[in-house]
Image: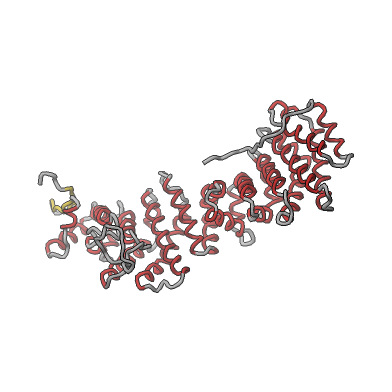
Amino acid sequence: MSRPCALNGNMAAPTTNSDDISASIARILNEKHSPEHLQVLQTFTALLQDREYRDAVGGKAFSGLLKVLSRLRDELQASSGSDYNLKLQLAAECFRAQRNSCVQSSRNQCLLRELGFVDVSLQLLRFLYTNSKSRDGVFEPVRCGIQFLGNLAVGNQVCKDDIWQRSFPDLFLQLLSVDDEKTVSHTSMVLHTCLDEAKVEELSEPQNIQLALKVMELCRTQPELDWTVLIATQHFLKSAALVEKMYAAMSSCERLTLLELISAQLSGEESLDCGVPSNVARFLASAFQKGCGAVLTLATGSASSEEVLQEALTVIGLLDVLCEMTSHQAQFLQDQPDLLVTTVELLKQVHAIGKASKNIFSSAQNFSTPSDEDDPSSESPVVSFKAHLIRLIGNLCYTHANNQNKVRELEGLPLILDNCNIDSNNPFISQWSVFAIRNLLEHNRKNQELVASLERCGAADYSALRELGFQVEERDGSLLLKPVRKDA
């Protein structure tokens, strides 16, 4: 994923000596606008592509450029004469020159800020935004102006803070809402560049939350915009306060986008904190506990509306995220109050519903592509749901004696053993069951004794385990889960 820090376009080649530029720019202020003025600005823009020239250009040239930009701002606001389009082109070229001047030049960044370019540029951008739907040619200067802000902010905290103070939240929100993909992309770049931990916390305030929600909407509707995804993953997901406020304000469909981004973040992380702060993980666990009952509506067909279906899919998404988090050694979730209890109880309900009648939670051994439209498992949204419940239980019990004991007290051991069968609706459920049993028995004598007693009284069927290449063996009073010897 590219992360450009400077944006440069193709400029016209220089046509005059750079020493004459300041005087040429100054003459623009005293003459009626003409194509020759555009050529002067294009020449300045081209010269500024050269680093040596950028480092040497004097403040006089920039002061003249600011006066030209200010004049264009005033004239564009005051009239719509025959030369309106020429003025838009001149404004775009001013912005290009400003943009080029800031590339890898902290000197010019500070100089332009001190001269007042930020204020004048933002005033012009606000005006152009209000005319973006009624005027052709407006988006060219808008794009160039936003690129200037981006280059001004890169690596310069003072400029970042200045742009943020003058643009947040209204102008950012307005520019992210226009019907122009490049404008939205450039604005996202500026927003990403300006953000830091303190600014993310500002986004969680009620009057600012709409900007965060707009970024998330763009992640869903325009996933090809890398900058919005970077904003969400590198900034938003680091703040529990913001995640919680966004989640509360989102529809179920929008929540699914958030969960997909979290899953993508987790897939690339191997750190002990699972790539998501612990307080964010705990909030998501709480959301799963509160909403998990919604998935049961899928069994009876009571999910009559799209919103109810989306709520159930959100629960499924939350479960997937929790499985990934607890697979990344996120031990803090093992102590999340009632998470394990909720998961075991939900598994009981799903398992019982699936056995009571043929429905979406019933086991199946159909490994061909479903062709019967009446088949409840056809394109089922709960494929692997039960398997992932068992996976989460296994993760939560890994080297955790209290959770191992809790599953035994909740009568979860026989429940998991009853799922050691191949089920086409839950790929790998037998493997996840073996994994969970292994974690439940490890260094836990009471759990081992319970499983042994289930086998002796015939309450547990180990044939499925044996078919998977495992056997339950009692040794010195302990029950071990061992691979079956290939020559046995």
Q: Nearer the viewer, residue 97 or 85?
A: 85
User: 81 above or below 371?
Assistant: above
Counting from the top left corner in percent of width and height, residue 94 is at: 76, 40
Image quadrant where residue 292 sits: bottom left
Q: Residue furthest right?
A: 30
Asked if residue 426 lies left or right of residue 332, the reply is left
User: Where does the image place residue 301, in percent across and percent down from the top left?
Assistant: 37, 72
Is 358 above or below relative to 253?
below
**Residue in the image at 70% along x and 45% along y:** 140
- Identity of the residue drawn at 47% across and 51% down: 277
Nearer to me, 164 or 67: 67
Q: Position of residue 359 (x, y in %)?
A: 31, 69
Side of 108 where 329 appears, left or right? left
Residue sitting at x 39%, y 51%:
330
Q: Quadrant of residue 5?
A: top right
User: Is residue 21 something that shows in the picture?
Assistant: yes
Q: Compare residues 284 and 147 and report the one nearer the observer.
A: 147
Across the whole image, how many numbered discs are drawn on residues?
Answer: 0
Displayed quadrant of residue 459: bottom left
Q: Residue furthest left?
A: 488
Can the viewer see residue 345 in this picture? no
Q: Left or right: 352 with respect to 51?
A: left
Q: Residue at x 49, y 62 (%)?
A: 253
Image-based side of 20 in relation to 144, left or right: right
Instruction: Give how far across and how far down residue 81 sits, in percent.
Output: 84, 51
